Amino acid sequence: MQSSLDYRTLTGYDTYRDLPRLWKDNGVIVAMDIRLPNASDRTSVIGRTGSGKTQFGMWLLSTQSFDTMPWVIIDYKGDELIGKIAGIKPITYKSVPEKPGLYLLKVLPDEESELSDFFRKVWERGGIGIYIDEGYMIGQRDKWFNSCLTQGRSKRIPMIILSQRPLWLSRFVFSESSYFFVFDLTDNDDIKRVRSFVRTRSGEDIGDQMPPYHSRYYDVSRRYMAKLGPVPSGEKILALIERKIPKEKTRFL
């Protein structure tokens, strides 16, 4: 079953006011005819630095199924919001999680081979979600990263990949994405790359400036585009994530 913003129990939000508001040029509307990624989709979140993509990415992660399957956050930059998640479990390249929950893998720029081997383990096991901030840091020709992208649906490896430089990403990030969330872009080469995968409506261009923290939503299978307003505050996002993280069972001796 495809995820939908109409299912409040799926998103964890109590009211529609907590959801990113769909907007048109003539003002905000309440109806939301958009779907969210499910447990086998790949999703691209792209935009220049400061456009709001990182906070949006964390909101999108808060809607995912880490209460029923493991999700690994691959963090290159020591993101502040990620660092505030209570209940997230740090892991190393040697361990691929099996239990539901959120896991944190901190990566350094010179650890390409270790990260690639981690993707191999994820590909072999399957049933693991992957969230990547600064996806351009991963080599475009990384065999196991691209394998997770191209075979992620059959192996149930959902992926959310954020990047400020679409041009530097593996082409498979875009060709395999079921959903795009495009924030403001300024580099012409980045805009051209996104144009080749996202079909805008007549009279619109993917390079048109977006208001701060707003994005274009694109559902590939339906060729459907909408514009989204800002997501909730970081504090609300953290509360939603922490509410869904499975609690450790207390053991009595």
Image (tube, rainbow, N blue to C red):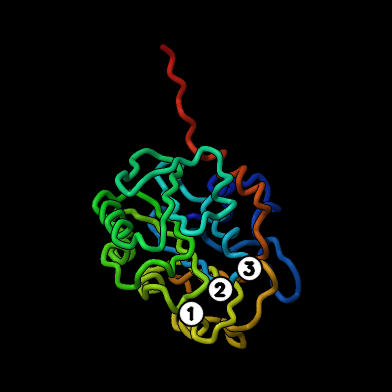
Q: Amino acid at mark 2?
A: Met
Location of residue 252 with respect to 168 vertically, above or below: above
Q: Residue at x 59, y 44 (%)?
A: 240
**Label 3 crowd (10 A; few <14 / some 14-19 / many >=20):** few
Sequence-wise first label, 3 or 2: 3
Q: Which residue is labeled 3 in the image?
A: 50
Q: Are marks 2 and 1 in contact (CB under 8 Å)?
A: no
Location of residue 243 with respect to 138 vertically, above or below: above
Q: Is label 3 in a helix, a strand or a loop?
A: loop
Front position among marks 2 and 1: 1
Sequence-wise first label, 1 or 3: 3
Residue 225, numbered label: 2
Q: Amino acid at mark 3?
A: Gly
Mark yes or no: residue 128 visible: yes
Sequence-wise first label, 2 or 1: 1
Q: Residue at x 39, y 44 (%)?
A: 91
Q: Is label 1 in a helix, a strand or a loop?
A: helix
Front position among marks 1 and 3: 3
Q: Residue at x 71, y 53 (%)?
A: 17
In the image, taking residue 191 as reference, residue 93 lies left or right, namely left
Q: Which residue is labeled 1 in the image?
A: 194
Q: Residue at x 60, y 46 (%)?
A: 238
Q: Amino acid at mark 1?
A: Val
